[in-house]
Image (cartoon, grey):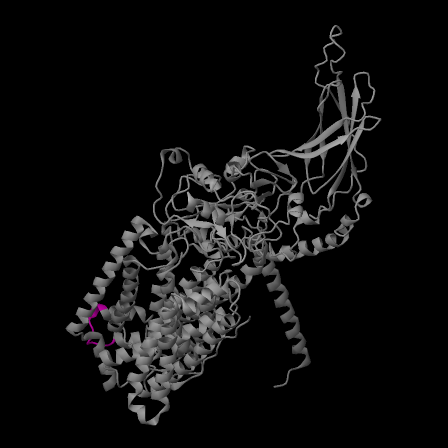
Amino acid sequence: MTLPRRSFFQFLARGTGAIVASWAVVKGISATVFREVLPARSVAPTNQKWVMVIDLAKCDGCRDCTRACGAMHFVPPMQEWVKVFEVVDNPAAGRYFLARPCMQCDNPPCVRGCPVGATFKRTDGIVMMDQERCIGCRNCIAQCPYSARAFNWGEPPHTAAELSQPYSMEYNYPHRKGVVEKCIFCPHMLRQGKLPACAQGCKMGAVYFGDELEDAVTNSKGETIPFTKIAKRGAAFRLLEELGTEPRVYYLPPASRKYPTPDEKKALEMHS
Amino acid sequence: MISKREAHLLSTLTVASPRFYQWIAFLLAVVLWGLYAYVHQLRQGLIVTGMRDEISWGLYITNFVFFIGISHAGTLISAILRVTETEWRRPITRLAEAITVFALCIGAPMVIIDLGRPDRMLNLFRYGRIQSPILWDVLSVSTYLTGCILYLYLPMIPDFALLADQASLGAWRRRLYKKLSLGWTGSAAQWTLLERAISIMAVVIIPLAISVHTVVSWIFAMTLRPGWNSSIFGPYFVVGAIYSGAAAVIFSMFVLRRVLRLQDYLEPVHFRNLGLLLLSFAMLYLYFNINEYLTMGYKFEGIEKEYLTRLFFGDYAPMFWTVQAIGVFLPLVLLIAVLGLRSHTSLTIPGVALASFLAIIGAWAKRYLIVVPTLSSPFLPGQRIPWEWTHYRPTWVEWSVTAAAVAVFLLIYGLFSKLFPMVSIWETRDPEPAASEAAPAASPSSNWGSISSIPVVLLTLALAGAGTAHAGESHKPRKPAPTALSLEWQALPADKLSASSAEDGPPDSFTAGRVQNGLSQLFGHLSFGSKSAEEEKPPSIISLKAILKDERGAPVAMQPVSFSLRTSFGLVQYGSRPTNEEGKAELIVRDHRYGKYPLLVAYGGDDSFAGARAEIPVDFGARPAPALPTAGVLIAPYATAAIGLPFVMFYGFMWLVFIYAFGYLILWRMRRSAQDKQPH
């Protein structure tokens, strides 16, 4: 088959036209479908970037944070939104306690994987959780490397105080069956200018909380320290940094501890 | 017109033995029991399952992956054989395609059964985020199911017309067949259209089938978990799916051949050929298994250590090695023995069927081993939690629902075999004159910068010292004299004081920001910079001057003045500085801070001077506009084009092809041509 030059040019022109036209259509569609507008709920009430610093040198593993959190959010039994782990990095190293709230990652795998936007990132850095939208697929639990998420497998036991309030995403109760829950940095407390429950509840003052843009973090004892200073001086690290989740929770290493270590604590308990 | 073997095939539609009814009754009982278990689960919640926070996916997800895998064979094998015009395929395409459709019908609802809130299922459409692998699944499985139903239905049309003419079948059945035949008359024009539609579907169903199981694997591979975080998961799943699916086709051939006595259609050659296919996929699957576990096991490092220990030597080891032996190795040996050794040719059919059965069982157990052990080896293993949380054991509810799922599959398959011939009649006839060549379809395919150092902003604020100064002249001169503090601040240019701040200077970050902005138009929050905006900002350098004077305006020297800043939750203490001879105390603050804050300065006072305080708002520069973190990839609440477009385009194209092949060619043109013919 021979192709006359003229029809070849016609072919080229038509082809180009078709490509240009389809590109315009794709662009038009993507401009309407893929809009970059933040919905209202993604915009936080204040223009702040919350950050938490947990000083492991001050953490004696008393689990006051877990209890304070549980009391504030009426966390169902068997769930711990702030969980205290006993960590041993290697056989030679001593043990230390590590409190793990939700890391409120800046690159959150749970948000990426949520099919319905029930968990979403807010402009103040909090990874929110909407129990009214959650379908209970538990993909976020599979995604979260920190195991910071819990699921209401059955109907959670209720208390009168919990049920007296209408549901709010800001405090995540009354609890419901079949949805995922997690630590959300107590947005309802932040609204009132108060520290989250765990920071307030930590008698050791190990949990510092504040606004990164303000460059200040405060603990339960009212000690306020510039965040950059505490992070730099203290050589702060983030949990599982290598995963690239960019957590908003920083840890200060458990150096020069002034309370019994987990091992010593155990020995003391054995003697008494 | 109807040959002897066709007459027998037709008789399978009408004759049913008592054992058939017993079998159906048994299956119905299992289904009802499963239904009871599911209702129990709906009322009580997933607490009645063995799943807990640690191992949050179990049998249901295993079943989902298993059934989607089983669904792979049918259509894919049939499509490949059709596209390559392989002649021996003719008797097996329909029973293979039926497996696909029914396995999908069972597999897809498994995810819904697994949902904590199935009542909110429609949220997937109301609020669906294309960035989530779950939504990819919804998109791909629904497209695949539609395609497979059409692909099963199209080649049945001529058979429907033929069946509608059979007087031996009941009246209601014949009416049903007549409806389903869409006015098929068997004219040359209709044959052309049908063959065209079938071959178009056969071509597109191949990439579609491969995409579906890849997407299923991505639910796992898109996580960070050990054992799932693997780039090979897509092809690994696809090969595993075809392997288990081919086994399902062979096993159903074996059963149908015996039960419906289809020896005339399903000959040893079919078992031999499909057995060879199974053998090659068993080898391929073995290769993928070795590749997957050897690359992890050789290094035995990091987070995978715990996972592999449990899998290779720990509590999952007995199951793991049994599955590898029964699901892969044994079928391999068996197939080589019956297909490779000439002395064993008489055993081809039972041998291949047995190998298939083992492969199916192994495939299910392998899916379980993919889902559960990974979840039981998290990065932060749970502490102070019940033993059952970390050692998943399915409950009776899960087993009942699983049994019911298998029963439903067998039930539909059994009923289908009674309602429709399991072997295509027209395709297995001797050369059809009207068949024309088919044309396969062609497939396409803020920066708000560093705070430009505010030149000089001077705010002077003087607050009267605590007015405790009552002129008590009568008292001793010991009475402290009132003082006043005045305070001023100045933002210094960034490069003046610090050499270190020069290294994160703005010029590069400005252009980088622009490039990123341009790309983010297309990619949304698929950012390329890992540096967050806060880090790029050099510290604001604020020079503070407090002047302490007494009531006569004379400077008070050598007195400590303390500085602090009021932030949201507390005071940042900057410590004290002494005043000099001019009563001036200076402090330079270099903090990475934004916004306006009250700066407090206080003088505690001593015996001769009373204390004083002053407050002044200090501006560290405007806060950045509220935005989602640039470090977040694909976390936007809106659809992101970079992920959305490929999916929408791929599956959208599939839907367009379906509309063309079925809607236009069959429903529109073929039916019209039938209506034109009817009047004469």
Whether residue B362 can be seen here: yes
User: Which image quadrant is residue A9 in?
Assistant: bottom right
Spot occupied by residue A121 in the image (x, y as percentages of width and height): 54, 48
- Locate residue A148, reporting x and y percent: 48, 50
Asked if residue B153 shows in the view, the reply is: no
**In the picture provided, is B289 more to the left or to the right than B569?**
left
Give the main secondary structure of the magenta stretch. loop
Residue B256: percent from left, percent from top: 26, 78
Residue appearing at x 39%, y 75% in the figure: B324
Q: Is residue A213 above or below residue B142?
A: above
**Residue closer to the observer: B33 or B268:** B33
Q: Quadrant of the N terminus of chain B?
A: bottom left
Compare residues B463 and A23 and report the one nearer the observer. Answer: B463
The quadrant of the image that shows the C terminus of chain B is bottom left
Furthest-front residue in this view: A271
Q: Residue at x 54, y 63 (%)?
A: B646
Position of B523 with respect to B285 (left or right) is right
- Is residue B167 shown in magenta? yes
Which residue reaches farthest bottom?
B343
Task: Please say whether residue A76 is one of the residues in the magenta stretch.
Answer: no
* Left or right side of B303 for B120: left
Q: Quadrant of residue B168?
A: bottom left
B279 vs B93, nearest the viewer: B279
- Examine the rendered structure and indicate whether residue B341 appears above or below residue B31: below
Query: Looking at this rendering, what residue extends furthest in the left direction?
Result: B18
x and y, in percent, of residue A203 in the image = 52, 37
Q: Over which residues does the magenta segment extend? A: B165-172
Check the image and report above or below for B237 versus A132.
Answer: below
